[in-house]
Image (cartoon, rainbow, N blue to C red):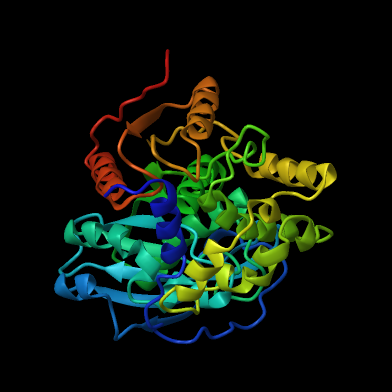
Amino acid sequence: MRSTGPVAAAALVFALAACSAPVAAPTPPPPTPLTAPEGSERGEIVSSMLLGQVDIGVAYLGGTATKIVYRTTDGVTGGSTQTSGTVFVPKGSAPPGGWPIVSVGHGTTGVTDECAPSLYPNLLGSIGLVTPFLERGTVVVVTDYQGLGTPGDPAYLDPDAAAYDIIDAVRAARNVVPEVGTRWGAVGTSQGGQAVWAAAERNADYGDGLQMVGAAALSPTADLTRFFAPETEQTLSRQLLVPYLFEGLHVADPSAERSEYIRGTFADNVTALTACSDLLGFRKADAGAVIDPADAVPATEQAADRMTNWLESVALPRSRTAVPLLVLVGERDDLIDPSWTRSAVAKACDLGQDVELRSEAQQGHAELAANSIGVDWLVDRFLNVPPSSTCPR
């Protein structure tokens, strides 16, 4: 699949709106203790429900899906919170040693509760990272992320919150499916690419009791510090990401004002651009067509510095990890500049991390063709195939 320029921007508009009929309305869980969960409290199940309506691909493979709410660590406050997700189990019996399991990080869907992927059979498009693993006899868990479908504000792009969600989703799945073993891997696209990269970094100090075999970060939002730099072209795809960046900034810094980053016709249409209830996406497409680029950049130098400082605080890498890492970039990506990701990989290499950087000349941002690359790479890690590294040594 190839999509560039206006076509890619339109694809992003519709991708953020690709909402099929939801499975069920989210049920707010009871309040959780303020202290961070420890030991067996991490991934503790608050509620679970076997879903009768599943994606056609899951049904064809004879798999099952269970909606869960589980305890995890709040990446913003350091206390306790609850996150929802979906556990998929393949047909058949677990192999000796238990099912292997993959934790999937989904790309940006929205910042309102109806955009939680667990509410939809197709996970708002992320089902394409589920069925290939089910076909290979692997349990899959897909977290919704903190604050998306559960109480609280989404901690958009917060690497700690994402890491806790990804890792504790595995623990939660093991609580629901006792036949799941301790070997696990992670794969994610865009926002999810950043999430699984962050999980790999936190694996050493937070993944105790589990054996992580690798993480595949596809078109990751690893380092966006140059997002508003003077030399950065503000493509439509980047303009459409600004409301999400503001939401992430606002959670970290509540004093930030929306009007400093979103104004004019953009502000008038921001609800349509960030919500997931407009089923066919017509309002999103219409809103995207009338955006004035000047309305989607910081209004003042102070506002620009505040946003850039926050983006620096959530950028990856932050530390070395011993976990094998695949990073894929599409050279036609007009949302995450490939040079930004290559710079992040270079920093990881400087930290002593072994990274395999894969460049796809004909791909744009988080294209479906990247999924199979990530799946195959992670399957090799489960099979103990030695990983490659493109880092200079």
The one nearer the camera, 306 or 317, is 306
Q: Residue at x 51, y 74 (%)?
A: 283
Q: Relative to 213, does residue 15 appear above or below in the rendering? A: below
Residue 313 position, x and y percent, is 69, 42
Give percent across and percent down for residue 241: 57, 55
Q: Which quadrant of the rendered structure holds the C terminus? A: top left
Q: Is residue 338 above or below residue 20?
A: above
Identify the residue at horizontal 50%, vertical 46% (top origin): 335
Task: Identify the residue at image location x=54%, y=63%.
Answer: 288
**Residue 240 horizontal side relative to residue 175, left or right:** right
The quadrant holding residue 129 is bottom left
Q: Is residue 338 above or below residue 29?
A: above
The answer, for residue 42, to whether it is visible in the render is no
Residue 190 vs residue 138: left or right?
A: right
Q: Tag count in the figure?
A: 0
Q: Give x and y (percent) for residue 187.
A: 38, 50
| Residue 96, quarter of the rendered image | bottom left
The residue closer to the viewer here, 71 or 191, is: 191
Residue 231, percent from left and from top: 63, 32
**Whether residue 324 is visible:** yes
* Furthest residue in direction top, as rendered: 393
